[in-house]
Image (cartoon, rainbow, N blue to C red):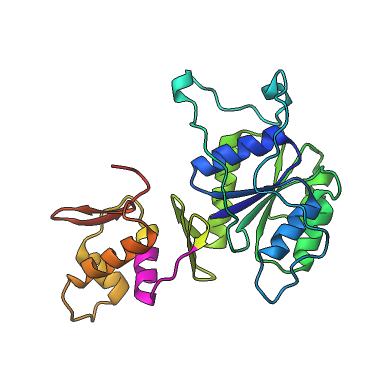
Amino acid sequence: MHILIAEDHPDLQKILTLYLQKEGYQVSVVSNGQEAINYLLEHSSPGKPKSLKKPGYQKTAPEKPACQNPESQLPFAPPTIASSSTAPPPIAPPTTNPPTIPDLLILDWMMPVQDGIQTCREIRALNLPIKILMLTAKGETEHEILGLTSGADDYVRKPFDIKVLLLRIKKLCRLEGILCCGDISLNQETFEVRKGGNPVVLTRTEYELLRYFLNNQRIILTREQLLNHVWGMDFEGDSRTVDTHIRRLRRKIGEEYIKTRIGIGYVISDRKD
């Protein structure tokens, strides 16, 4: 799943990128609403205009001198860490732009050049297929109403807990019908499958097989279950056809996801066991 962050605070850009990448999301970053619009237009379908304004998006957060106390300037309290050994490992920013439009935009309200409210309205006017989660330090009820009526799908006040934000993102994905496992995502509305933000071309049977796995993550599925749900009860072929299709699917999405449980069946998981 691909997430675009529109946020002008460098430290928050880096923190959000770190935690989202750790969850397996593909992340891109821009610093204001104008850059967000340009980015979405450039990565939308070929029939749409490529840019309405001067391009200026960036793929990673800009480097700036570290502040003396970065945590005091962040709009949320980082998770409590027992020791340095438990801190999340640094994750390198993406080196290439995903070729398709992001699935979700994390949009800050207060930004230079163009704010989040105007940006949200423009995106909805363009009918771009993207979920919008708005972040803001504005805490009044009328501000939340304004954000939601401008087209945002969800609204999170600063300061926020990063764990809560991640849960809200996952909830928006489920509402959109997107199934995820690691860097694999499957959109049940558009039938798109992506790995690390890049499209994966599957046959109909491979798509249905992957969808059934993603709807039953970390559950061991027998060949009979897979045959019944993917091929249908009337299928008269050999159960080993499951093995053939799983080998092909593994080559396309990565060998590490679908694991064999000898004598039982298969399971999909982002764990390394």
Q: Which image quarter holds the C terminus? A: top left
Query: Can the viewer see residue 149 in this picture?
Result: no
Q: Which residue occupies the extreme right position in the image?
A: 113
Is 71 situated left or right of 246 in this image?
right
**Where are the magenta residues, as a range?**
199-211
Q: Position of residue 267 (x, y in %)?
A: 28, 54
- Check the image and report above or below for 83 versus 218: above
Q: Does 209 appear in magenta?
A: yes
The overriding secondary structure of the stretch rendered in magenta is: helix
Find residue 17 and report its image quarter. top right
Q: Nearer the viewer, residue 69 or 117?
A: 69
| Residue at the image point whose x is 79% and y is 52% from the top | 33
| Residue at the image point whose x is 60% and y is 27% from the top | 78
- Check the image and report above or below for 200 versus 203: above
Find residue 18 and report its image quarter. top right
Q: Position of residue 186 (x, y in %)?
A: 47, 62
- Check the image and report above or below for 180 versus 128: above
Find residue 157 and report its image quarter. top right
| Residue at the image point whose x is 26% and y is 64% from the top | 247
Q: Does 177 appear in magenta?
A: no
Q: Position of residue 20 (x, y in %)?
A: 55, 43
Is 232 situated left or right of 210 in this image?
left
